[in-house]
Amino acid sequence: MKTFGPAMEPLTELSPGIRRLVAPNPSMMTGPGTNTYLFGSMEIAVLDPGPVIDGHLDTIISTAAAPIRWILVTHTHPDHSPAAMALAEATGAELIGLSAPEGEHQDMTFKPDRSPVDGERLKTSEFEIAAVHTPGHASNHLCYLHAGRNWLFTGDHVIDGSTVVIDPPDGSMKQYIESLRKVKTLHCDALAPGHGELIRDPELVVDWIIDHRLEREGKVLVALRENPGLSARDLVPHVYRDVDPKLYEWAERSLLAHLIKLDEDGRATVTNNRWGLLDV
């Protein structure tokens, strides 16, 4: 897993009408912290207000310096959406996003007022943003395309300086790779991730992620051929020799996602949690 870069400035104006705040929740999994984006100057849309941290909520409201009318959420993991309800209660803003699926690590407090379909647009006098459904990291994951800048705000679909964990059953490697290919077709000028800095070479980065995942899939196939009948946990050291053993718990989740994809592709099979190759 790659490491994140140095600490980011807490407030950055990326472009006229687009500001970025960094929530004070840095960690191994969140990098410098969760990026909260503010769109507009007269009426504000907030994207991913992050976890419930009083100081961060206060900073969002004071930075907005105008009525907050909309709160957009990319997905309902605990570092992205829990503050949405508190911010909506404080401002009366409309909540936009997809409801949380059942399962661990989900923010069940998020209750959207509007659940956009793929391509649905939020149009204001200052900006236009389209929802792009990108399941994979999470089944309810949305990216948001800012029409004026042709920037895609990617949440955890693509982040800066690291790869993301695909954690079944809600996470799907097959859907994730399909969604990455979908992003390529948008021909964006930049990607604005949920963690880290603006990505100015979108197609190069997306290609690298796809290649990296498929290269890892190739290692899974080799491991299955050489070590048939192992569980996902027992396969981890064979597939992730380049990863610190301290990260094996997370690696096992991504490995399971790869195995499930191979099963869906008709290339692997599982019996009693033991995996093997299929002759194809």
Image (cartoon, grey):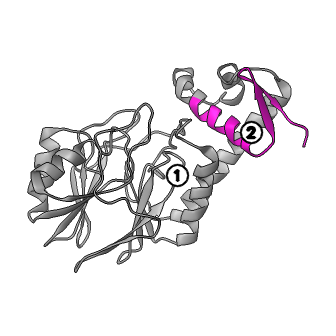
Q: Quadrant of residue 95?
A: bottom left
The disc labelled 1 sits on which kind of residue?
Pro
| Residue appearing at x 9%, y 66% in the figure | 66
Residue that sits furthest to the right in the current view? 279
Label 2 crowd bin: few (<14), some (14–19), many (20+), radius 10 Å: some
Give the residue at mark 1.
135
Q: Residue at x 53, y 36 (%)?
A: 167
Q: Which residues are magenta?
A: 253-280
Asked whether residue 111 is drawn in magenta, I would say: no
Q: Indicate whether residue 263 is drawn in magenta.
A: yes
Q: Position of residue 75 (x, y in %)?
A: 39, 48
Residue at 60% in and 51% down: 175
Residue 193 shown left or right of residue 63 in the figure: right
SS class, disc 1: loop
**Where is residue 156 drawn, in percent x and y?**
44, 48
Q: Amino acid at mark 2?
A: Asp
Where is mark 2, residue-wise? 263
Task: Say which label, 2 or 1, has the lower sequence index.
Answer: 1
Image height of 93 relative to 156, above or below:
below
In x, y percent, where is residue 41? 16, 71
Q: Does residue 43 sit above or below 207 in this rendering?
A: below
Query: Does residue 146 appear left or right of residue 141 in this picture?
Result: left
Within 10 Å of the Cα at label 1, are there few (<14), some (14-19), or many (20+) other Cα atoms?
Answer: many
**Displayed quadrant of residue 15:** bottom left
